[in-house]
Image (cartoon, grey):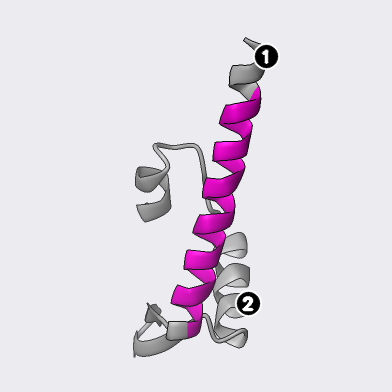
Amino acid sequence: EFVMELTKGRVRLVPGTLYTMLSKFESEEMIQEIQVEGRKRTYVITERGKGMLKDEYQRLKLMIEEGTAWMEGIE
């Protein structure tokens, strides 16, 4: 639900995809499980995860800047 709301419905995560991603992120120490209550699991982002997120943000921001410059050149 969080992802659907954040992306205004553009991204839908089905349980299989979500659990695969969580497992990968945890094994790569990007997130850490901090609590389990029945089937509910709570995670926090690690310092490594924050660094990777910031790097990805900068990469995407640069792509947008370059794409914007290119698009303005063809108009």
Question: The residue tagged with tag 2: helix, strand or loop?
Answer: helix
In-image side of 10 versus 42 (left or right): right
> Residue 14, position in %: x, y?
55, 54
Residue 52: numbered disc? none
Q: Between label 1 and label 2, give the one nearer the viewer.
A: 1
> Residue 21, position in %: x, y?
59, 69
Task: Give the amino acid type for the residue marked by disc 1 in the picture.
Answer: Ile
Question: The residue tagged with tag 1: helix, strand or loop?
Answer: helix
Task: Give the amino acid type for the residue marked by disc 2 in the picture.
Answer: Lys
Q: Main secondary structure of the magenta part?
A: helix
Query: What's the residue at 39%, 80% (across, down)?
Result: 43
Query: What's the residue at 49%, 75% (across, down)?
Result: 51
Bounds of the magenta span? 48-70
Residue 74: numbered disc? 1
Query: What's the residue at 57%, 77% (across, down)?
Result: 25
Q: Nearer the viewer, residue 70 or 54?
A: 70
Q: Nearer the viewer, residue 3 or 70?
A: 70
Residue 24: numbered disc? 2
